[in-house]
């Protein structure tokens, strides 16, 4: 059946991170696998085009009501957005960044939950943002016709936290973009060299916030640095919140001169940044999916990551798993990944196999099935076609 699908794509900003990348790739995948549908995309004003395709079945609405203003965002979500849906005669609204309008809409509603960090790790969020987000997320999950979780681990967390039947929750894994592969990019390499990125280095990618565990990674790097005098630690990611200890630890480190903070790295340069790394370290304390680990595997880079949350199911047998609370385990894993050529070769081969199991077209097809089931469950389609 042909559907009129509205997607809240306001998280697709120029310097997008995990959720923004998810929305961008999902929308483009939906257009490839579901061209018979019509799409209404709510995008941030002055942001990049979400669909990035001049298609007649796509309508874009731009708004300034993004994450930069909570009041403006709340007003737009709960008063302006329902009006757009009614005028466009949408069958369904997908809220891919946790939060949906407060009241239950006439249209079917699908919500994607990426992780439950705000619930499981309250201490790593500011006291102003956390309670408000938890309240809105609870309401969104309660009113949704269908819930998408990005991993089995997240599905279990949702069912446990909200005491709901797992049948309401469908797991749809992220994909990995075709840009992430082993083929080198000389122009990107030259740009990275101008930014001071000089192999050999350990790489970590992610917003600088407590959950990403940068402090223990820096301390583990201190342990291995003496054995590898030319090795550097490259930290790529925007500055987030509650991260003063990260910068303080790096500044006071005995190997602080070998630690490079890159801030945000563009989509054009990120694949080459992975390819040039000796190892990509991702010892996060908790992840709903962990896309950087998968991207690094697709590039043929050895990966060290945590043995918790969703990360083991994402990387399979292709990565080294460590206890993220143990500096000594992280250090031992880094040493093994750097100095053991047989291990590196095996991880590279397994990484390519594991990465091929994840595609955005597959994610889009599975998401479309969730949409269709949600619309049918609400009998929205016959109601709007009368």
Image (spheres, grey):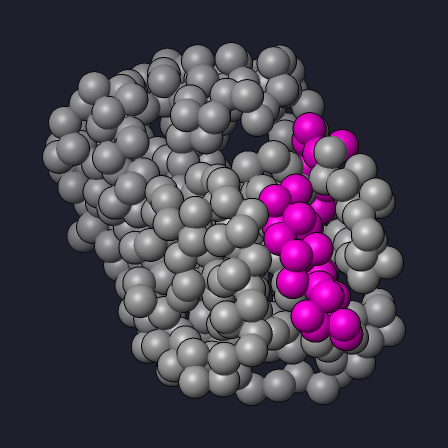
Residue 231 on the magenta span: yes
Q: Residue at x 68, y 23 (%)?
A: 69
Most foreground residue, 235 or 254: 254
Q: Residue at x 44, y 39 (%)?
A: 286
Q: Residue at x 36, y 22 (%)?
A: 140
Q: Is residue 99 above or below residue 134?
A: below
- The x and y percentages for residue 217 are 62, 50
Q: Residue at x 65, y 62 (%)?
A: 224
**188 horizontally vs 380: left or right:** right
- The x and y percentages for residue 86 are 39, 27
Q: Can you see residue 181?
A: no
Most foreground residue, 152 or 315: 315
Most foreground residue, 261 or 69: 261
**195 horizontally vs 5: left or right:** right
Most foreground residue, 27 or 136: 136
Q: Is residue 281 above or below residue 153?
A: below
Quadrant of residue 354 within the rendered picture = bottom left
What is the total number of numbered labels drawn onto the structure image? 0
Quadrant of residue 71 within the rendered picture = top right
Quadrant of residue 374 within the rendered picture = top left
- The x and y percentages for residue 197 are 78, 70
Residue 159 on the magenta span: no
Q: Is residue 79 above or below residue 244?
A: above
Q: Which stretch appears magenta? A: 215-244
- The x and y percentages for residue 174 are 38, 56
Q: Is residue 176 above or below residue 76?
A: below
**106 horizontally vs 102: left or right:** left
Which corner quadrant holds the C terminus?
top left
Q: Can you see residue 280?
A: yes
């Amino acid at each position: 059946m042909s559907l009129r699908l509205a997607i809240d794509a306001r998280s697709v900003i120029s310097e997008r991170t995990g959720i923004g990348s998810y929305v961008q790739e999902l929308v483009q995948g939906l257009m490839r696998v579901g061209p018979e549908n019509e799409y209404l995309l709510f995008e941030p004003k002055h942001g990049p085009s979400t669909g990035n395709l001049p298609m007649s079945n796509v309508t874009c609405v731009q708004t300034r009501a993004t994450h930069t203003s909570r009041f403006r965002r709340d007003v737009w979500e709960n008063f302006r957005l329902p009006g757009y849906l009614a005028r466009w005669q949408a069958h369904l609204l997908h809220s891919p960044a946790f939060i949906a309008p407060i009241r239950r809409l006439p249209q079917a509603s699908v919500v994607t939950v990426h992780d439950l960090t705000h619930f499981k790790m309250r201490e790593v969020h500011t006291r102003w943002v956390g309670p408000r987000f938890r309240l809105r997320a609870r309401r969104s999950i309660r009113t949704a016709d269908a819930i998408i979780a990005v991993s089995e681990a997240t599905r279990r967390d949702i069912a446990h936290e909200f005491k709901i039947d797992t049948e309401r929750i469908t797991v749809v894994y992220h994909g990995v973009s075709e840009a992430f592969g082993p083929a080198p990019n000389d122009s990107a390499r030259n740009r990275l060299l101008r930014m001071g990125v000089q192999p050999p280095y350990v790489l970590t990618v992610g917003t600088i916030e407590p959950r990403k565990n940068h402090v223990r990674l820096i301390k583990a790097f201190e342990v291995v640095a003496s054995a590898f005098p030319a090795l550097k630690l490259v930290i790529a990611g925007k500055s987030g919140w509650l991260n003063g200890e990260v910068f303080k630890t790096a500044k006071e480190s005995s190997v602080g001169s070998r630690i490079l903070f890159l801030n945000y790295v563009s989509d054009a340069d990120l694949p080459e940044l992975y390819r040039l790394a000796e190892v990509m370290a991702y010892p996060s304390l908790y992840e709903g999916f962990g896309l950087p680990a998968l991207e690094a595997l697709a590039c043929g880079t050895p990966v060290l990551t945590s043995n918790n949350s969703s990360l083991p199911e994402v990387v399979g047998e292709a990565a080294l798993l460590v206890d993220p609370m143990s500096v000594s385990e992280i250090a031992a894993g880094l040493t093994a990944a750097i100095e053991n050529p047989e291990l590196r070769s095996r991880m590279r081969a397994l990484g390519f196999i594991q990465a091929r199991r994840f595609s955005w077209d597959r994610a889009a097809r599975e998401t479309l099935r969730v949409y269709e089931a949600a619309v049918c469950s609400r009998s929205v389609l016959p109601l709007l076609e009368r």
